[in-house]
Image (cartoon, rainbow, N blue to C red):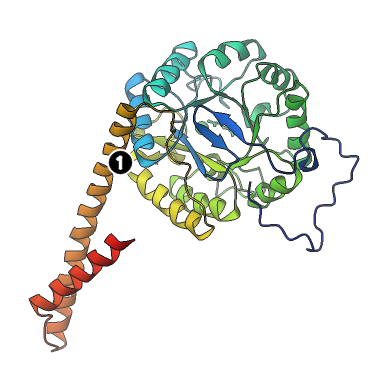
Amino acid sequence: MHPVTNEHAEGGDVTPPDTPYKRIHRSARPEGTRVRVGGVEIGGAGFVMAAGPCAVESRHQLEATARAVAAAGASILRGGAFKPRTSPYAFRGLGREGLEMLRDVGRELGMPVVTEVLDPGDSNLVADHADILQIGARNMQNYALLEAAGRTLKPVLLKRGLSATIEELLLAAEYVALQGNTDIILCERGIRTFETATRNTLDLGAAVLLGERTHLPVVVDPSHASGRSSMVAPLSMAAAAAGVAGLIVEVHPDPSHAMCDGAQSVPVSAFPALMDGVATVLSARGRAFSSPAASLDPATRLRLETERLEGLDRMLGRLAGERRAAGLRIDALQSKIGRPRRSVPEAEAREKRTMETHAAV
Ligand code: PEP
Ligand code: MN
């Protein structure tokens, strides 16, 4: 977390020295915790994007999503194999089969995997397949689960409960830390408020305050926080501006047919634009996405970089088309108000200047 702190601000951190969350309090490690998974570091200088489907539905769906998000610059793959569903009749995940798919696709792309564990008895099974164990909002205060996940000594992504206070979230994290495991990532994923227009209310202030109170990295989940795919990019940019360590975002190749959380899933086709928006915000803070894992083998990196280049080319093609259309509209308007149309050499010179400016950056 890179909080925007003001030590002299009224009402600054008033946590007493006899804090009840001793192991995770900022003073226990003032420099902050960096959680390392594979070649990725969460809580370091680089901003980390975890992305993938809400639920693993099939090998094909997972692979298509993972390839697309990796090519756009995501460094961690998310996906649920054990799904906590409000209705017991809803799709509850592929279980062990889903875990195997996650492990295989993650390995293939060199992406660490985060997935939810629902049952303390499954902790070791999940730890054998995943790099980060997610404890979901509904289980934030399931103390047996917190301890079991902590004991695996794998990093834990702890999501804030639907109605949990900041203090309750921190105390839940302390349960994990007490197992000798401080590789904990806190996740603000929206809380339940009086508002019903959105699925939850993103508490960005909590994300900032958590970064002051604890040394643990904090990430934001704009997908569950809003429940609406149209809000995911703006909230992602807001979280990046607030200085969090990263994001966890739901992405699907065909959201309208998703078996879980389709309404909040960003289509794979829209994900590169989301990444570009976040990158722009990050640059204002002197930050950037964490670069692809240096530990990846060159052949995999080459494939990912090639896919990224192809994506950028498609984007450029689209922009060139839009630019041409804007030029035609200008020509039409100029002739309508009796101004001379732009001469071809003038338009070409302008285009050349634009290209040169962009090539220089
Ligand atoms: C999820 O990440 O898919 C999920 C179920 O999240 P939450 O626990 O925040 O609802
Ligand atoms: Mn979900």
Residue 93 drawn above or below residue 337: above
Q: Up-down: is 141 above or below 352?
A: above
Observer able to see residue 255: no
Nearer the observer, 250 or 27: 27
The residue lying toward the viewer, choosing from 67 and 258, is 67
Residue at x 34% of width, y 25% of height: 63
Q: Residues within 10 Å of mark 1 (few under 14, many from 20)?
A: many
According to the picture, the residue beneath numbered tag 1 turns out to be 308
Residue 226 versus residue 122 in the image, above or below: below
Q: Does the residue labelled 1 lie within 8 Å of ligand 1?
A: no
Q: Farthest residue in the right direction?
A: 18
Q: Position of residue 185 (x, y in %)?
A: 63, 34
Label 1 sits on what residue type?
Answer: Arg
Residue placed farthest to the bottom in the image?
338
Residue at 53% in and 45% down: 226
User: Helix, strand, or loop for circle 1?
Assistant: helix
Q: What residue do we see at 61% from left, 11% from top?
A: 124
- For the point 20% across and 53% down, the residue is 317
Quadrant in the rendering for residue 349: bottom left
Q: In which quarter of the image is ligand 1?
A: top right
Front residue of 62/223: it is 62
The single residue placed furthest to the left in the displayed view is 344
> Where is residue 202 drawn, in percent x and y?
60, 48
User: Would residue 335 be found to the left or right of residue 243 on screen?
Assistant: left
Residue 315 horizontal/vertical position (percent): 26, 51
Q: How many marks?
A: 1
